[in-house]
Image (cartoon, grey):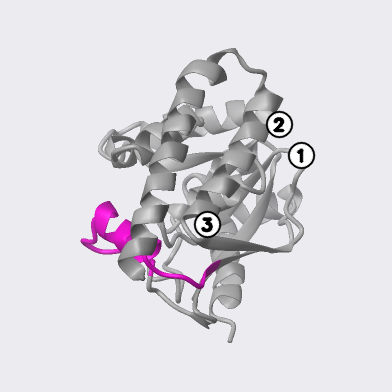
Amino acid sequence: MGVFLFAVRLCALIVWIFLGLLCVTVFYPFARAATRCAVTRRWSGALMFLCGIKIRIQGRPALDAPALWVANHVSWADIFVLNSVRCVSFISKSDVRAWPVIGWLVAGAGTVFLDRGQRHAVRGVSQQMRERFARGEVVGLFPEGTSSSGLDVAPFHSSLFDAAIRADVDIQPVALRFMHKGRRSDYVSFVGDQTLVRNLWLLLRTTGVVVQAEFLPVMANDVCRGMGRVKTAERARALIRAAVTRP
């Protein structure tokens, strides 16, 4: 059953991803921003459905004003889970751009890539974040800097929090909890030396994968400004960690 399910899902996924690439390269350059966002939300939700991932939204996501969404990072799927809620411009490490297919998709959807080997990389990314905030967009950030098992939350890097604070933008923490067959699990987490192909093999051949995306209360900009970026990052991590590790 697992091999058959994998084959069926993989075929559907290939077709859907091809349509996504076609949309990004042919349609997006000429479409209005609102239209691109609507397509991105629906396409991302359908992608997760085809992968066998059920999404459960909890809390109140910020849907109207510009904001910085900060979340724990478990899998490549995190990007599409959050994009199914609202069109998000993510900050991602530069090597994601080289990933087959997924790298092309996230680049076409407006991802900002951070090259940690460049001395002034953070400054350039911060400027791009401020431009997106000025357009009323949400920017997504995974401050752990890498993916984890999803059962705990690693310390946050605080440097990119400063762009939101200086832009007078609120920050909303988001806790991502991965479930497998009714229990918290790291079964489909994308960590360590695991390849994307291996992760897809595990995901597409199983059932019962659920991602709970809990949108925690917004951290108002004036409060964050008073705390500064380091304490703001620590507070956001504490809130997310409390939700992630909750029984």
- Which mark's residue is nearer the viewer, 3 or 1? 1
The residue singled out by tag 1 in the image is: 65
Disc number at residue 136? Answer: 2
Residue type, numbered disc 1: Ala
3 or 1: tag closer to the N-terminus? 1
Q: Please state which amino acid type lies under the numbered disc 3.
A: Val
In percent of width and height, residue 64 lies at 78, 40
- Residue 161 in view in this figure: no
Q: Amino acid at mark 2?
A: Gly
**Residue drawn at point x = 46 percent, y = 24 percent:** 22
Residue under pointer 3:
230
Local packing at callout 3 (Cα closer than 10 Å; few below 14, some 14-19, many 20+) is some
Q: What segment carries the magenta color?
A: 188-210
Q: Give the Cα distance between marks 3 and 1.
A: 24 Å
Q: CA distance from mark 3 to mark 2?
A: 25 Å
Q: Is residue 159 above or below residue 31?
A: below
Mark 3–mark 2 CB contact (< 8 Å): no
Q: Residue at x 71, y 31 (%)?
A: 136
